[in-house]
């Protein structure tokens, strides 16, 4: 168990990290390694409280969380790109990423639509009423997000919602299986939505 001395010392260090982190928040990530060290330090200090006797140690989960936090911190200062989107899909554990990437292209007209540019919505999501969401509101009858990466997080929540309802999409059988799933749940109002995804995939291959 941590003593009062351990706790007060940890709080002083954490306070120092927080002051340094706030100073870096308003810069364009000029010193990326320093920012990552601060984020890792905060996670390290918070996580050490759960270790018996207060003996701090960095776990793989803590390191992974640090990498994810640092990635999203950098992302806020970078223009959108498909490569960054792919990284987001990976960080969020999105399944069937190839199909989901095609959905983003189709839903946004290759990232040019008003819903994407002003609503930060990559997947044509509506504001949900039954599942958890990170959407901040509604824009032209679609969910609106503070940043485009939040729509990726929301897509991950959407997939987890259907997994929790018993839909067996977690094994990633093949892309055709996921396309059938999207059709069965009527993901889009367009009756040609799936065929358009297939056509788009063929263009990407050629």
Image: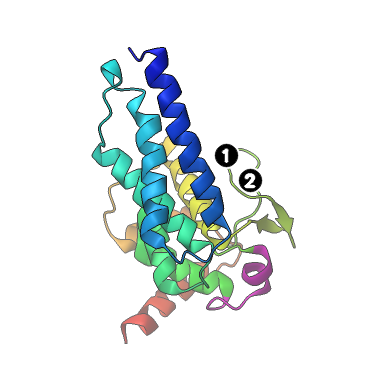
SS at mark 2? loop
Camera-side residue: 80 or 104? 80
**Mark 2 Cα-neighbour bin, 10 Å: few <14, some 14–19, many ≥20:** some
Q: Is residue 180 visible?
A: no
Name the residue rendered at 60%, 78% in the picture. Answer: 112
- Cα–Cα gap, marks 2 and 1: 6 Å
Q: Position of residue 108 (x, y in %)?
A: 57, 72
User: Where does label 1 land, which residue?
Assistant: 131
Q: Position of residue 174 (x, y in %)?
A: 28, 59
Answer with the quarter of the image where residue 89 lies: bottom left
Name the residue rendered at 27%, 17% in the picture. Answer: 52
Q: Position of residue 142 (x, y in %)?
A: 68, 58
- Label at residue 139: none
**Mark 1 Cα-neighbour bin, 10 Å: few <14, some 14–19, many ≥20:** few
SS at mark 1? loop
Q: Is residue 111 above or below residue 64?
A: below
């Amino acid at each position: 168990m941590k003593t009062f001395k351990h706790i007060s010392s940890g709080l002083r260090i954490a306070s120092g990290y927080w002051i340094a982190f706030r100073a870096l928040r308003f810069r364009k990530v000029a010193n990326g390694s320093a920012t990552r060290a601060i984020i890792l330090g905060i996670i390290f200090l918070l996580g050490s409280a759960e270790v018996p006797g207060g003996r701090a140690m960095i776990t793989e989960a803590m390191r992974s969380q640090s990498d994810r936090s640092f990635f999203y911190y950098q992302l806020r200062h970078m223009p959108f790109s498909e490569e960054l989107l792919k990284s987001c899909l990976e960080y969020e554990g999105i399944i069937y990423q190839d199909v989901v990437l095609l959905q983003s292209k189709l839903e946004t007209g290759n990232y040019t639509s008003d819903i994407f540019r002003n609503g930060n919505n990559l997947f044509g999501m509506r504001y949900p009423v039954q599942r958890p969401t990170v959407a901040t509101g509604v824009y032209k009858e679609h969910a609106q997000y503070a940043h485009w990466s939040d729509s990726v997080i929301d897509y991950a929540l959407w997939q987890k919602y259907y997994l929790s309802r018993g839909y067996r999409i977690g094994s990633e059988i093949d892309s055709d299986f996921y396309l059938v799933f999207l059709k069965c749940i009527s993901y889009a109002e367009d009756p040609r939505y799936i065929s358009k995804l297939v056509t788009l995939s063929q263009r990407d291959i050629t």
